[in-house]
């Protein structure tokens, strides 16, 4: 299922990840372990502002079925079931939360060497149908996405995009928000491990006559340490340091400040992910 163009959500994903992933403004610690029976268990505690929360999750794979269950401190249970190859070249994902019975969703993904199709239906009183498709190859893709609400007969969203992928770079253009926003991004990797890279993203919102431009990058100090930084045209500067303290265990320090208002206190975040 990896020989085709990929899902529509993959267009521009590498640039988005470099500009957003691991940038946090709270405190978070997670501990992961795997039992002898193959169950992966992760316990997470988060402090945001003056509020604390936590959850415990378990992931288990049996043949072509992946079961993901998570229980949080508010006694909510989130369950995701992923079935691979029920029908050749397909993946079926069913998700729901207890006690919120209106949160259910079923998604079916079909992968072909030159096209990918995904359909998702929400299971509630006013269901929404989301469809997305891509056509092309792993190196060049054109795609579109739309949401439809049968009860009102209206389109809730429609988006189109194009992506060009090369071994050391990725470029994309996405027209979203029902044609009100256009976003272009480009990322270039400077090493084979793709830990050192530079990225640029520009967004134009037509209704507000507003542009937003963000540049950023990541740099591998050594095999265990990476730093990232980003800056947009509104003066928001973000930076982070990530270090592998022991194999597969990471500590991440993150900060964000407004360079146009230096009297404001910068935001700081700390994440610790342990996999003993």
Image (tube, helix red, strand yellow):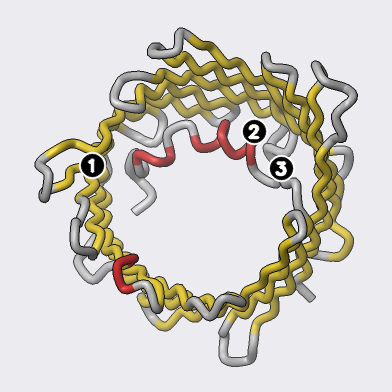
Q: Which residue is mark 1?
A: 147
Is 160 drawn above or below residue 226 in the view shown?
Answer: above
| Residue contact at pointers 3 and 1, CB within 8 angstroms | no
Q: How many other residues sit within 10 Å of disc 1, few (<14), some (14-19) or many (≥20)?
A: some
Residue at 48% over, 19% down: 184
Disc 2 on helix, strand or loop? helix
What label does residue 23 carry, if any? 3
Which residue lies at the image location 74% right of the left edge and 73% below the top edge? 31
Relative to residue 155, is residue 85 depicted above or below?
below
Q: Residues within 10 Å of mark 3 (few under 14, many from 20)?
A: many
Quarter assignment of residue 45: bottom right
Give the percent coordinates (x, y) of residue 29.
77, 66
Say above or below: 160 vs 87. above
Residue 86 occupies quadrant: bottom left
If the image is split into quadrants, where does the C terminus sit? bottom right
Q: Which residue is mark 2?
A: 19
Quadrant into which the N terminus falls:
bottom left
Residue 224 on image: x %, y %: 85, 50
> Label 1 vs label 2: CA separation?
26 Å
Which marked residue is nearer to the observer: mark 1 or mark 2? Answer: 1
Compare residues 143 and 237 and report the one nearer the observer.
237
Earlier sequence position, callout 3 versus callout 1: 3
Mark 1 / mark 2, whichever is N-terminal: 2
Between marks 3 and 1, how big is the CA–CA gap?
29 Å
């Amino acid at each position: 299922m990896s020989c085709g163009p990929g899902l529509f959500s993959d267009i521009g994903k590498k640039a988005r990840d470099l500009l957003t992933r691991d940038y946090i403004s709270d405190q978070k610690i997670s501990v992961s372990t795997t039992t002898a029976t193959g169950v992966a268990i992760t316990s997470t505690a988060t402090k945001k502002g003056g509020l604390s929360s936590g959850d415990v999750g378990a992931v288990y794979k049996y043949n072509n079925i992946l079961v993901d269950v998570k229980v949080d401190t508010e006694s909510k249970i989130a369950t995701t079931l992923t079935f691979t190859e029920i029908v050749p070249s397909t993946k079926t994902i069913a998700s729901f939360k207890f006690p919120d019975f209106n949160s259910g969703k079923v998604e079916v993904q079909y992968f072909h060497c030159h096209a990918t199709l995904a359909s998702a239906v929400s299971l509630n009183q006013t269901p929404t149908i989301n469809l997305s498709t891509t056509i092309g190859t792993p190196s060049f893709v054109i795609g579109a996405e739309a949401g439809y609400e049968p009860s009102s007969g209206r389109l809730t969203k429609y988006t189109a995009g194009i992506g060009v992928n090369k071994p050391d770079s990725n470029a994309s253009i996405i027209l979203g928000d029902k044609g009100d926003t256009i976003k272009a991004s480009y990322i270039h990797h400077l090493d084979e491990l793709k830990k050192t890279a530079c990225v640029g993203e520009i967004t134009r919102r037509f209704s507000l006559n507003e542009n937003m431009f963000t540049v950023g990058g990541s740099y591998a100090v050594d095999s265990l340490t990476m730093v990232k930084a980003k800056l947009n045209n509104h003066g928001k500067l973000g930076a982070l340091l990530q270090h592998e303290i022991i194999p597969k265990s990471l500590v991440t320090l993150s900060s964000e400040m407004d360079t146009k208002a230096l009297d404001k206190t910068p935001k700081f975040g700390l994440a610790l992910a342990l996999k003993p």
